[in-house]
Image (cartoon, rainbow, N blue to C red):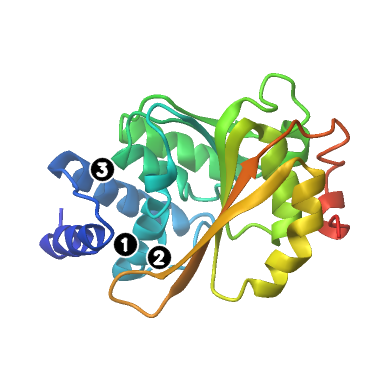
Amino acid sequence: MEKEFEQKMKLYANEIGIQLEEEQLKQLYQYMILLLEWNEKINLTAITKKEEIILKHFIDSFTIAKYLKNNAKLVDVGTGAGFPGIPLKIIRPDLEILLLDSLKKRILFLEEVIRRLTLTKIHTIHSRVEEFGKNKKYRESFSYATSRAVANLATLAEYLLPLVEVGGYGIAMKGSEIEEEVEKSKKAISVLGGKIEKIDSFQLPKSDIKRNIILLNKEKTTSLQYPRKPGTPAKEPIF
């Protein structure tokens, strides 16, 4: 493991109140190397500089850890190259995590990462989220459903809230300009049985990169008509 990687990871993690152990640092480093190797074969990330991977992928993923109760079940919707699910699993081994993605190549990469890092209580599913949300085995079975940079908030609520048990949370990880998006999403969130509990705004450590975390509390069961068929939530959000 490179010394610079170790120092940067510790520095940035400390800034957000996370202490990394030696084994976790090794796992994160191995994950980064696998990401860069596989990225030459399949498109996993546009971020390829190591310092940017540390900050924009790993640290960014860590920022929701403080909202998650011990031993909770979490589904990471549209996980892509495994963010935030895999970094969360590394720093929070107590969590039971399901990584959901619609592209088989990405699932194969995630399975390789899980195997090489010997992670447990973490699984992958290859599915469209609209179909997954209709599956009785998984519907309303998670404490948390999260997603990073997948869709506008109205659409995202239709992906996340059907998966969350009543009393659980959808956690939307967003960039900077969200005011209009939040306003437009209120009807959808209400129709789907949720409410915006709070929005936390902050900057990633040692940077001017703005982030917002939107916590959607699930207050009542989501109507069985949601999520609608694949493609509909994105094309026709509930406004």
Q: Nearer the viewer, residue 89 or 110?
A: 89
- Identified by mark 1, the residue type is Ile
Q: Residue furthest left?
A: 3
- Identified by mark 3, the residue type is Gln
Hey, which quadrant is residue 130 in on the image?
Answer: top right
- Few, some or many residues within 10 Å of mark 1 (<14, 14–19, 20+): many
Q: Nearer the viewer, residue 189 or 87?
A: 189
Tell me what residue is drawn at x 37 percent, y 52 percent. 62
- Vertically, is 49 above or below 42? below
Q: Position of residue 192 (x, y in %)?
A: 78, 42
Hey, which quadrant is residue 9 in on the image?
Answer: bottom left
Q: Position of residue 116 (x, y in %)?
A: 32, 34
- Vertically, is 108 above or below 199? above
Question: What residue would you read off at disc 3?
Answer: 27
Tell me what residue is drawn at x 42 percent, y 69 percent. 202
Question: What residue would you read off at disc 1?
Answer: 54
In the displayed structure image, the side of residue 9 where residue 54 appears, left or right: right
> Considering only order in the chain, which callout, 2 or 3, is on the residue closer to the N terminus?
3
Q: Secondary structure at mark 3?
A: helix
Quarter holding the C terminus is bottom right
Q: Are marks 2 and 1 in contact (CB under 8 Å)?
A: yes
Distance of label 2 from label 1 (alpha carbons): 6 Å
- Identified by mark 2, the residue type is Lys
- Few, some or many residues within 10 Å of mark 3 (<14, 14–19, 20+): many
Q: Secondary structure at mark 1?
A: helix
Q: Which mark is residue 56?
A: 2
Q: Are marks 3 and 1 in contact (CB under 8 Å)?
A: no
